[in-house]
Image (cartoon, rainbow, N blue to C red):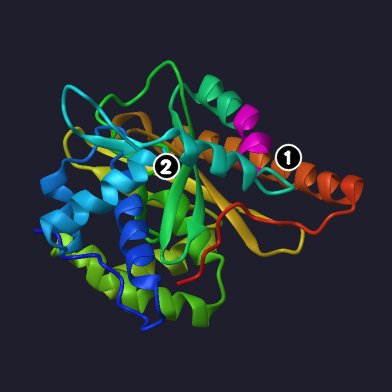
């Protein structure tokens, strides 16, 4: 059962409606592939049905949200896309990484994900499918997950300072346990230590079919973690020899991406900027 996600009222005049609208936009964005029903939105936010309907109609009028005529489900609208384009950073991580993701997918035949941080979450900003893709993935572009979930997010999180990891753990351990009751902070800490020691993260994506993933962090020119990249495949395809191949492929790719990021910063003489690092 989902917990209400309405943000607390800050007390500032005129901000409550804005906070509620943003909460709705976040939920719609997470479920943009399948769409969101009105009932799902007011249950998830804990708001009254008429309030949610009024806010949605206002956002539809402004083209932030669109409603599909047949299903009545809500999706992000054209203005949301236009705003996203306008907000693109000077150094576009996704644009730089896409050709490399395609190359990994072609070389391995597997599915490749690029994840950036947004507060306590990781957001999938790009994916590439090889010739042997996993058909049952629920993780797709635009979806949020706790940063510790998934190999790319775990690799990114493991590269953060210890005090920041502690802060994320305080929030995300309980969030993750709601969906995975057997999850523990001790297991997360062990995964972080293992990732730091080996230089890459591993993660069990799902049990049926058994799917595993391998991820590495991409660092920005100032050395801070910028994104995580991961390869996901059937566990049967990830034996020791093939794991070594995937790790080498990721390592070569990360080095090439980091070199291109440095080149962009030096060429354009602009400060490095990540697309979404909204620290909660």
Give the quarter of the image for residue 267.
top right
| Residue that mark 2 sits on | 62
**Mark 2 against mark 1, which lies toward the viewer?**
2
Asked if residue 8 is positioned above or below residue 130 in the image, the reply reads: below
User: Are circles 2 and 1 on residues that touch, CB within 8 Å?
Assistant: no
- 22 or 275, which is in the foreground? 22
Q: Position of residue 100 (x, y in %)?
A: 63, 31
Q: Residue at x 23, y 52 (%)?
A: 54
- 174 or 36, which is in the foreground? 36
Q: Position of residue 179 (x, y in %)?
A: 17, 58
For marks 2 and 1, give the CA distance.
Answer: 41 Å
Question: Is any atom of residue 106 visible in this view?
Answer: yes
Asked if residue 44 is positioned above or below residue 110 in the image, the reply reads: below
Left or right side of 29 for 92: right
Asked if residue 234 is positioned above or below residue 265 in the image, the reply reads: above
Q: Position of residue 242 (x, y in %)?
A: 46, 32
Q: Residue at x 88, y 47 (%)?
A: 268
- 221 or 204, which is in the foreground? 221
Q: Residues within 10 Å of mark 2 (few under 14, many from 20)?
A: some
Q: Which mark is residue 256?
A: 1
Q: Earlier in the sequence, mark 2 or mark 1?
A: 2
What segment is highlighted magenta in the picture?
93-100
Is residue 264 shown in magenta? no
Is residue 96 shown in magenta? yes
For mark 2, give the secondary structure: loop
Asked if residue 141 is positioned above or below residue 27 in the image, the reply reads: above
Q: Residue at x 68, y 49 (%)?
A: 89
For mark 1, give the secondary structure: helix
Give the quarter of the image for residue 182.
bottom left
The majority secondary structure of the magenta stretch comes to helix
Q: Position of residue 198 (x, y in %)?
A: 53, 58
């Amino acid at each position: 059962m989902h917990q209400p996600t309405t943000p607390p009222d800050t007390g500032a005049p005129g901000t409550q409606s804005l906070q509620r609208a943003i909460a709705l936009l976040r939920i719609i964005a997470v479920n943009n592939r399948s769409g969101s029903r009105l009932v799902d939105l007011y249950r998830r936010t804990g708001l009254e049905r008429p309030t949610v309907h009024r806010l949605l109609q206002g956002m539809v009028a402004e083209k932030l949200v669109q409603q599909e005529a047949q299903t009545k489900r809500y999706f992000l609208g054209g203005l949301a896309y236009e705003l996203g384009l306008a907000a693109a950073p000077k150094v576009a991580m996704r644009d730089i990484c896409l050709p490399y993701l395609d190359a990994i997918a072609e070389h391995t035949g597997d599915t490749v994900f690029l994840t950036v941080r947004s507060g306590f979450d990781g957001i999938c900003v790009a994916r590439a499918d090889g010739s042997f893709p996993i058909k049952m993935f629920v993780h797709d572009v635009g979806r949020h997950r706790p940063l510790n979930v998934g190999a790319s997010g775990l690799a990114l999180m493991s590269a953060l300072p210890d005090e920041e990891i502690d802060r994320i753990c305080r929030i995300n351990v309980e969030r993750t346990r709601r969906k995975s009751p057997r999850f523990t902070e001790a297991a997360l800490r062990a995964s972080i230590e293992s990732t730091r020691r080996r230089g890459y993260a591993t993660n069990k994506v799902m049990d049926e079919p058994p799917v595993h993933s391998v991820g590495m962090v991409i660092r920005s020119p100032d050395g801070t973690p910028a994104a995580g990249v991961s390869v996901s495949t059937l566990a049967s395809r990830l034996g020791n020899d093939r794991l070594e191949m995937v790790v080498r492929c990721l390592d070569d790719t990360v080095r090439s991406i980091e070199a291109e990021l440095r080149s962009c910063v030096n060429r354009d003489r602009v400060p490095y900027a990540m697309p979404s690092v909204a620290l909660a």
